[in-house]
Image (cartoon, grey):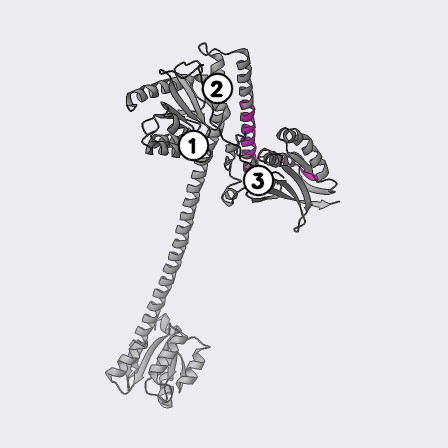
Amino acid sequence: MTASQMQARILIVDDETAHLQALCDLLRDHNYETTGFANGIEALAYLRNNTFDLLLTDLMMPGLDGIAMVESARKIDTDLACIVMTGEGSITSAVKAMKVGALDYIIKPFKISAILPVLVRAMETRQLRMANAKLELQLRQHTAELVILNQDLEQARMQAEIANRAKSTFLSNMSHELRTPLNAILGFAQILASDSLQTSLDEKKEFAKHIEEAGSHLLTLINEILDLAKVESGAMKLSIEAITLDEIFAECKTMIDPLAQKRGINVSFAENTNLHVSADRIRLKQVLINLLSNAIKYNRHSGTVSVAAHVADDNHICIQVIDTGVGLSSVQLETIFQPFNRLGREVFNEEGTGIGLSLVKHLVEAMEGSIGINSQVGVGSTFWVKFPGTAAGIPYQQPETKAMVYEVTSGEKSSTQKYLLYVEDNPINLKLVAELIRLRSDLVLLTATDGLLGIEQARLHLPDVILMDINLPGIDGIETRRYLLSDPRTAHIPVIAVTANAMPADLENGKAAGFFAYITKPIDIEQFALAVDSALEFAASKKPI
């Protein structure tokens, strides 16, 4: 006998007791382990608590016949190999048995030599079924694992794409922010060093002041970028200690008062709080000064800023910086802590790096704290920070945006003079370009501080050439260019992009937008002059009659 036969367990069901006993005895002699029952009900009850390899059942039995026996048994054990025995021998009963899961059909009476091969085939079929079921299970498991693996790979790919886009956006924004102050520094420096652009002593002092201010802004930007890089990489060393809030508030008040007085903003600090927080003293002051500076710079006329502190429900110390500024929309709040995102605040012509709040968030979290904001448009904003610790006005009016006209020659515009419109929201950049063309008697410079005003100026004056910044409040320079192209009155005017957006993708976008030339900041004076002259020549050849 084979090993499978020696190990096989057979459940025999037959209402003929003599036949049942004889069959059990004969199969035991051939190394099968047998258990017999004279009715199907008892056999099924036993099968529920015991395991068998084969079921050998009579077809015609009182109560539960062989067909029902096979069907019920396979519901208990789907791997059970079933064989039906009967003296009837009809094709109909054989088909019924096979439909419910019987593997074979034996006609009574039979010799033991006739049934042994049937049992062997049944055992082999059972083992094949079980092997196939195991393979199917493994295949399903492997398929599920492959699906999970593919999902993980897809998620990793998406995260990599997001990271790459974020990296590209960061580099593009950083390039823009670095080039903006550099434009003023190098531009005014070139004017001071030029033999052809004569300047008075007062103008030299003014230009030197612009260079100093731009250099200071650039230094602040570089320091904040370095701080952000340090804290993101975990390289920034923090000295966490118990800090008295009243002392920090007093130090911040001393530092922030000059800016508040200059802007006419009333700043008040909570007194005698008797609260202590666990934080790094220097970085906590950096966080509060940043929040206070923003609250002052972007406040309304004669607005207020108040600093409060209390023990929050989670037993952390909550510090609030509350302002009466213009507030932020829900869309702005979604991206408020992104680096270089100034949320449209550039419309105020305020100097800013756009990474202050991102740095603040990283610093707060590095000190085991949390940060958030509540804001309502037209009412104001409340920034709050929480740290572990213990307890011991006038309605806002949008500044009026006015177009400025720099006439570089005295008297009325002559027939030989050309209009040059510069659309730029940064006053220093406006001043720089005005100085670059000051000695040109053939030009009158018009300026606009946003895209919509630029379109209005272009339609009103029909300038010969337009200079266009890209990062403008409201509609940007690309969109403004599209408006000008779509208007038959202004479509012919050559437009030169003058921008700090200097990444390859920015240049491609500028080319697609149809700019006559694309000049990146810091401005090179010779390149600027050549581009303007080329645009003037083009305008003269294309100007409508």
Residue at the image point whose x is 36% and y is 62% from the top = 135
Q: Per the image, is 232 magenta?
A: yes
**N-terminal label among 3 and 2:** 2
Position of 197 with respect to 326 (left or right) is left
Q: Secondary structure at mark 1?
A: helix
**N-terminal label among 2 and 1:** 2
Q: Secondary structure at mark 3?
A: helix
Q: Secondary structure at mark 2?
A: helix
The residue range painted magenta reads: 214-243
Which residue carries the number 1 mark?
Answer: 451
Name which residue type carries label 2.
Leu
Q: CA distance from mark 2 to mark 1?
A: 26 Å
* On screen, residue 416 above or below 110: above
Does the rendering let one see residue 182?
no
Disc nearest the viewer among 3 and 2: 2
**Quadrant holding the N terminus:** bottom left
Q: Can you tell which mark lies on residue 186?
A: 2
**Quadrant holding the C terminus:** top left
* On screen, residue 423 above or below 395: above
Q: Can you tell which mark lies on residue 361?
A: 3
Disc nearest the viewer among 3 and 1: 1
